[in-house]
Image (spheres, grey):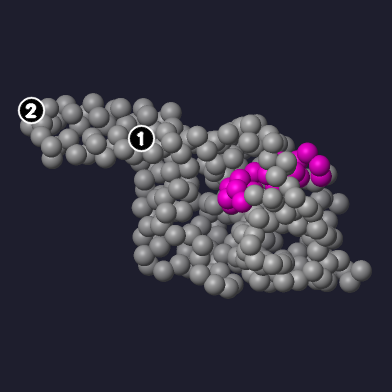
Amino acid sequence: MKKIKILISIYNDWKSVFKLLENIDLQVAEWDAEISILIINDASVENQTKTELSFKKIKSVRIINMKQNRGHARCNAAGLKYLTEKENFDHVILMDGDGEDRPEELTLLFNKSKENPSKTVTLNRIKRSEGLFFKLLYECHKILTYIFTGKLIKFGNYSCLPKEHAARLLKEACIWSSFSGSVTKVISDRISVPSIRGQRYFGPSQMNLFSLLVHSFSIIAVFREAVIIRSVLFLFVYLFFVFNSLSIITLFPVLILLIFLLLIFKISFRENIEELNHSLENIGSINVLGDSNGR
């Protein structure tokens, strides 16, 4: 029987993750696989509200409590490292803990992975549930990423990876900064299925304009070599056409591009293989949540 690990990183959102666990248990009830959950608690300041849950299908739920807050991407990387080094599994599914990665799509993901066991399966977002303003910002993020990298990235964390691919990602520093960017760069052997982004179970989204910018720049920084090449080409072409009419106004786009490149360069320092290699030292404790099958 296949062993499937589901990796969920959270910060404070306990109410949502407990509802998510209940919904996951319903969705995986008919799977011919052993299901275990690993929750990475990113040094939440809110207290865990439940200590006992009963599941019909989920074999176990463990919570790894981090000593210091590292951010979502780094928690996912640390979780992958923990599973790869310390657990026996065939595939790992990553998903957000707030309900936006809909558990109703888990079976679609699982079945596609069964058909293609050696491939990474991503869920490409074809529809979002956020407000118009956020949708507009997210489209700008995708366009910006495509312009500077040549990569059209339609997926986030929600995906299913064979253990071999998880181990391959952990050899790259970029996984410490961006999951989707790293998968796009490192894992060519992948396929996708369509996904509709869900709504949060409780409370407002933790993604604001600043965090979206960091998210976007972190992805772009993974492909900084391509960014530099494209930027240099743009500068040559642009300056060729405006050379005879140089002014503060015509040089303004150049200034904006240079500031952008500086930010990308700064963001790239988030990719730290040493921090990744020592990420498990940030584990404070590991708790077992409840018991499956009413045991």
Residue kind at label 1, given as amino acid type: Leu
Foreground residue, 33 or 82?
82
Residue at disc 1, secondary structure: helix
The answer to which image quadrant residue 16 occupies is bottom right
Horizontal and vertical percent for residue 176? 59, 40
Residue 228's image quarter?
A: top left
Which residue is denoted by mark 2 in the rendering?
244
How packed is label 1: few (under 14 Cα within 10 Å), some, or many (20 or more)? some
Residue beneath disc 1: 261
Which residue is painted at 76% across and 71% down in the image? 50
Q: Nearer the viewer, residue 157 or 202?
A: 202
Magenta segment boundaries in residue numbering: 69-87
Q: Is residue 53 above or below residue 77?
A: below
Q: Amino acid at mark 2?
A: Asn
Callouts 1 and 2 close, C-beta under 8 Å: no
Residue 74 included in the magenta stretch of the image: yes
Residue 227 image point, x, y percent? 39, 33
In what element is the residue under mark 2? helix
Provide residue 268's location: percent of width, then percent of height: 48, 35
Identify which residue is drawn at 88% across, 69% down.
293
